[in-house]
Image: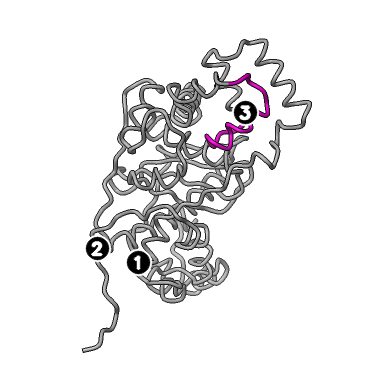
Amino acid sequence: KIKNGRKFPSAKLIAAIAHHVRQPLAFFTQESFLELGDGTLLFRAKANISRKQEVEARRHAEVVFEFGLRVAGEFNSLPVAIAPLKEKPVAAAQLARKQIGLDEISPIPHLIRAVEKAGIFVLAIPSFEDRYAFAVWGGRDQKIPLIAVAEGASGDRLRFSVAHELGHLVLHKGAFAGSKQVEVEAHEFTAEFLAPEKGIRRELMLQQITLDRLGELKLRWGISIQALLRRSFELGVITERQHRYLLQQVSMRGWRMQEPAEYDVPMEKPRLIRQMAERIYGEPLNYELIASEAHLSAENVKLLLERYASSAETHVPEVPSNVLRFPMAMER
């Protein structure tokens, strides 16, 4: 009733709700809470998602997004390098690589950092059953590209989901998320974006295609063995018969659901939002101080920021900033 505007909550009820969800009262009274909206929400999942689950994931992403906007307000705006494209999926993927500053033949060592540097907010949210990621153009004017990623996916699955959602951002702004054609196009985009034909074909043709060979390529390209197998077939490197045989071998080895640990792709974490928080508040982070300014509980701020890579967890160069921050107190 409250959500639908049919009942105005009393102060006592607001206090009870705040206590139940472990948030400060200020969380519910602050202005300009940003909703991501329904029309542009694009989910990626293994199974159908209920309306309740969809809203739950979106609300988590909104909290992270609003926190990100708060800390980003202390810095010069990071230019957005991508834009909606009218090209077909393969051509769009090639153009998107150029826009993000990638060449046309090489693997992407750290995909999440690459898209963050392109001005895309990567929102780390809690794990949800059978859900990996969704994308949306957010903000009041829907000009901020967002990719929300949930915990729990394997390293290669996470990379695939991020690239897949990037495809939705550039190909399908405002499109219907349930369309089969939309998903096919995003898959075509992902294949070319993560494994461009000009680069991957040469490596696939260097040696005979075996599952162990694909495992070695998985570690280099950050793509699952099964995705590389499909890519080999799509590019005509192997025949349909070879493709079927190798798929049977994948099933016989029990690799359909989980590929061997020796070929695990390292997990990636987003960095940008925590990086900005560290520059504002210093290290180690004072969660109580951040929480008081963000109108969140310290527990929630800690959980939120721990989903992002700290400076100690990454050796990737920081996103450049023109802002210089000085100590809070200086000797005279």
Residue at mark 1 to residue at mark 2: CA–CA distance: 10 Å
Lower sequence index among marks 3 and 2 = 3
Residue 17 on image: x %, y %: 53, 67
Name the dominant secondary structure of the magenta segment.
helix
Q: Residues within 10 Å of mark 3 (few under 14, many from 20)?
A: many
Residue at mark 1 to residue at mark 3: CA–CA distance: 41 Å
* SS assignment at label 3: helix
The amino acid on which the numbered mark 2 sits, given as a three-letter code, is Val
Residue at mark 3 to residue at mark 2: CA–CA distance: 45 Å
The amino acid on which the numbered mark 1 sits, given as a three-letter code, is Arg
Q: Which residues are magenta?
A: 207-226
The dot on residue 214 is 3
Residue that sits furthest to the right in the current view:
252
Comparing labels 1 and 3, the label whose residue is closer to the camera: 3
The amino acid on which the numbered mark 3 sits, given as a three-letter code, is Leu
Q: Is residue 218 magenta?
A: yes
Q: Residue beneath label 1, please?
A: 279
Q: Is residue 55 left or right of residue 331?
A: right
Q: Is residue 64 left or right of residue 249?
A: left
Lower sequence index among marks 1 and 3 = 3
In the rendered image, is residue 179 in sight? no
The reply to whether callout 1 and callout 2 are in contact (CB within 8 Å) is: yes
- Residue at 48% x, 28% y is 195
* SS assignment at label 1: helix
